[in-house]
Amino acid sequence: MNKFFTGLFLGLCSIQFSNAQIINTAAIDTSYGETDSKLSIHGFIDTYYNFDFNQPSNLQTPYQVSSARHNELNINLAYADFRLHGENYRASFVPAFGTYMNANYANEPQTLQNLLEANAGVLLNKERKIWLDAGVLNSPITNESPVSKDQLLYSRSIGAEFSPYFVTGARLSMPLDNEWSSSFYVLNGWQQTIALNSDKSYALQFEYRPSKQLLVDFNLFYGNAQNTNARKDFRNRTFMDCYFIYENINKTLGLSGDIYLGFQNTKDSLGIEHQGRWYNANLQGKIAIDKEQSVALRAEYFSDPDLMVAKVNTGANGFEVFGLTGSYQFKKFKNTAFKLELKSYQAKEAIFVNELSQPTKYSTQLVGNFAIWF
């Protein structure tokens, strides 16, 4: 009899169900069953050395989150990129590390500080190609991103450092025709993983791609920027951004430019309400010397007279700066790049601090990097 029950038990345990599987709730299921999706895995490592001629005592170049550590050999950004592509769904998971992550995610909760991107999406309408994605998303704003291999130069403009590199929320995207597409975002706020108040922020993007060589984007952001745990006078923020990126067919010439304008309601020291503003413009160009070498140049202007997004530690009344950056790039092997840059800023007021710990209008940096990706 015991052998009968033993055999019956073993027989029941060996039965296979084709459409369902019982999951033990005490363990994480890692089988995921059958799938028709494709998983792609990529990686990127960006090492750098930055010498700030002002030689900041805290070894941190001010007003930068990218490649900002002074006189150090370090990693700006290293990530593993996992992407899942199904017929009706998609997902991305990009854990990342480096000094960029430390600087740009410093105010985020610890469990979210190392997510460059993490989102899941579902295809709502196959015929019209309407997608809904939610999670930590790449920001649609400005012509620059944290990933240096995708930039004409290595470093980022100062205006880009004061705009979102990531957003958190939901995105509804769809093509309008063969050249135009649109995306609508509902967000937790202005570059933050968790909400700082009870209101939601919104963003709208229109993208124009007349060819594989040219991209033009227009973005609009609106939201309540009030931090309930800090300053309570920062409220409605409106931001408009337009940029283009062009690269010719043989990749010997690249051009990019961006302009943006932001407004925000706030109060001055006397409690009087007014509307602050900030704006940015940059123009970049890259030209190839030969198959392995290229040079690039960027001119930029950023102004935040009401200190809406910039925080000045020298007592200056506003933030207005002009910058010029020259770059040399060498690509000997596939999926690698070496870049060397000299960047210089001149401000209207003394917003920087020199090597003698005195306020100054000038800042100069020499930056070199080596990046590899797969």
Image (cartoon, rainbow, N blue to C red):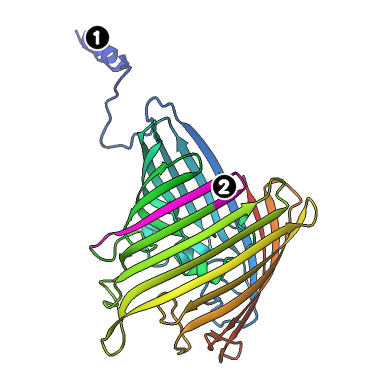
Nearest the eye: 24 or 332: 332
Question: Element at badge 1?
Answer: helix
The secondary structure that dominates the magenta segment is strand
| Residue designated by label 1 | 3
Q: Amino acid at mark 2?
A: Gly
Q: Is residue 20 visible?
A: yes
Graded by Cα atoms within 10 Å as few (under 14), some (14 to 19) or many (20 or more), the crowding at tag 1 reads few
| Residue designated by label 2 | 43
Nearest the eye: 300 or 68: 300
| 147 left or right of 312 in image | right
- The answer to which of marks 1 and 2 sits earlier in the sequence is 1
Residue 107 percent across, percent down from the top left: 38, 67
The magenta stretch is 199-215
Q: Quadrant of the N terminus?
A: top left
| 1 left or right of 141 in image | left
Quarter of the image for residue 245 reads bottom right
Residue 154, which numbered label? Answer: none
Q: Is residue 150 visible?
A: no
Residue 286 percent across, percent down from the top left: 69, 59
Q: Amino acid at mark 1?
A: Lys
> Which residue appears at 46% of the width and 85% of the height?
318
Q: Is residue 211 magenta?
A: yes
Question: Element at badge 2?
Answer: strand
> Which residue appears at 57% of the width and 68% of the height?
282
| 310 left or right of 55 in image | left
Q: Is residue 216 above or below residue 229?
A: above
